Image (cartoon, rainbow, N blue to C red):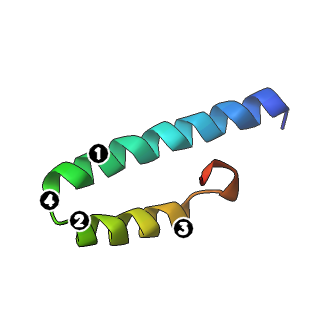
Amino acid sequence: MSTIERTKKQWQEHILFQYCYNIISSVVPDNIQQLKLKERLNSLLPEEINH
């Protein structure tokens, strides 16, 4: 896989993550719950796009 393809794939995953997280955030107003969900989602992501 080329670097460009890999980067594009990471972007797609990152955008998908942001999209899911925004939906979850709007459904789950509790901050503690959000943190738990964010941690869980982050653990599903490849390390390269975790910040």
Chain-order first, disc 1 or disc 2: 1
Measured Cα–Cα span from mark 1 to mark 3 = 17 Å
- Quarter of the image for residue 34 reads bottom left
**In the drawing, does residue 43 fall left or right of residue 19?**
right
Q: Which residue is mark 1?
A: 22
Q: Amino acid at mark 2?
A: Asn
Q: Which residue is mark 2?
A: 31
Q: Which residue is mark 4?
A: 29
Q: Amino acid at mark 3?
A: Ser
Front residue of 47/4: it is 47
Give the residue displayed 74% in from the left and 37% down from the top. Answer: 6
Under tag 2, what secondary structure? helix
Tell me, for residue 44, which label it has, or none: none
Measured Cα–Cα span from mark 4 to mark 2 = 6 Å
Chain-order first, disc 3 or disc 4: 4
**In the drawing, does residue 40 fall left or right of residue 47?**
left
Relative vertical location of residue 13 with respect to residue 44 in this rendering, above or below: above
Under tag 1, what secondary structure? helix
Q: Residue furthest right?
A: 2
Tell me, for residue 43, which label it has, or none: 3
Give the residue displayed 54% in from the left and 36% down from the top. Answer: 12
Give the residue displayed 74% in from the left and 31% down from the top. Answer: 5
